[in-house]
Amino acid sequence: MLPSDSPARVPLADVLHAHRVLQEVIVPTPLQPNRGLSAKYGCNVYLKREDLQVVRSFKIRGAYNLISSLPEEERRRGIVCASAGNHAQGVAFSCHALGIPGIVYMPATTPRQKVNQVKLFGGEFVETRLVGDTFDDAYAEAVRVSDREKLPFVHPFDHPRIIAGNATIGKEILEAGVQPIDILILSVGGGGLAAGIASYVKQVSPETYIIGVEPEGAPSMTRALEAGSVVTLDEIEKFVDGAAVKRVGDLTYAIGKELIDEVLLVPEGRACTTILELYNEHAIVAEPAGALPVAALSAVDPERLRGKNVVCVISGGNNDVDRMQEIKERSLIYEGLKHYFMINFPQRAGALREFLDDVLGPTDDIVQFEYTKKLNKENGPALVGIELKSREDYEPLVGRMTRKGLRFVELNKDPLLFQFLV
């Protein structure tokens, strides 16, 4: 750990050492100007493309820096880690490269793509074990095994060498030739990425304003800053798996509290919209946590961005294609373009035709319709999903249903019912 009397940050000497060590395995990722985002937000947007890293995320930097520093005796016994997926890939790659056995714990909810990549990178050196529903479940089991078997635990974020490895991203950003870096935006999960980059950047470029971004459903750093100490959240939304943790690290909190200037919360739906925009408009495959910084641009006052050099760190691109339908669904709902209703239809011939003719707008589209006719009933419920061309079409649609005398429930506004649809 850092000396108790030192500022909460990783020393520059540790970052420079990590930079030398990592030359063996990492790809120095590009800092790319993005014309589309720059025009959209009135500033100079640059994307730090850690999704182009050898394991498609930044996590290899901290994992390799820590594992390679272990004493020979500990290497022979092997290591244990817990991960939501990306840290596992970095650990697996490092174990294979160094010839060290490893046990990797991940939540059972981890996207299949990430699980398969862990097996690919680790080969015969790594065993994967899926436990629980969240990172915190996997973490608890991994710590138990580490203690029981006396194996080194490779923490995904709360360790000085992990943070020092991540800090090398900050070194690459500041040495990429863009001056000055006015605003730097990065995602916050456990805090290892933010703590690392902030440690380096604030020592070399203290005027750079650093914004951390969390998913709205997992605001662990935000709540810790509000409370003045690390707290454990009771429940979290697991969708942004790379940043969904119930508790940030003690060390990462201490560094973040001192060096991160602001923390923003981004709705999961907004992250989904950004994933689709990055793919369709910029040919970038970003995972939910990787899309958070770009998604946060819309939450920053435009006047603060105008004319500034703004760096967004795309932390990873391990997105499972099987999730794309859910991502599109969440995006449409967030943008107000898709709505679900439970509608009580009259059970008579022509009722559906009247709905199509009198209620549905010219550009409205029924994308889901489930109806079961009930015998000896005057009315029957139907689940109706409607996709709109624009957000402004919603109020007229509801108005026409009301004037038609239809009884309906808006499922988008009922969390208990809506969770069964998304």
Image: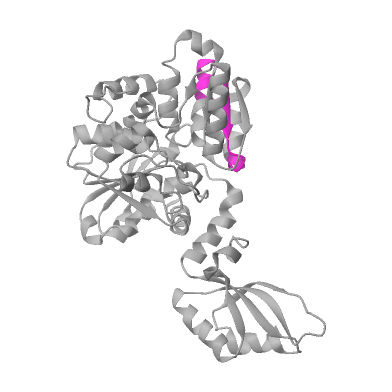
Q: Residue at x 29, y 23 (%)?
A: 2
Expressed as whole percent of the image width and height from the top left, the position of residue 180 reads 19, 43
* Near-viewer residue (251 or 335): 251
Say if 128 sits above or below 326 in the image: above
Answer yes or no: is residue 381 visible.
yes
Tell me the quarter of the image containing the C terminus: bottom right
Determine the image quadrant of residue 115: top right
**In the figure, is residue 35 to the left or right of 271?**
left
| Colour scheme shown | one colour
Which range is magenta?
A: 92-113
Say if 245 sits above or below 400 in the image: above
Q: Residue furthest top?
A: 73
Q: Residue at x 30, y 35 (%)?
A: 254
**In the figure, is residue 329 to the left or right of 199?**
right
* Residue 112 is one of the magenta-drawn residues: yes
Determine the image quadrant of residue 51: top left
* Residue 388 is one of the magenta-drawn residues: no
Q: Residue furthest left?
A: 207
* Near-viewer residue (164 or 409): 409
Tell me the quarter of the image containing the N terminus: top left
**In the figure, is residue 132 to the left or right of 206?**
right
Expressed as whole percent of the image width and height from the top left, the position of residue 17 reads 31, 19
Determine the image quadrant of residue 191: top left
Expressed as whole percent of the image width and height from the top left, the position of residue 168 reads 32, 29
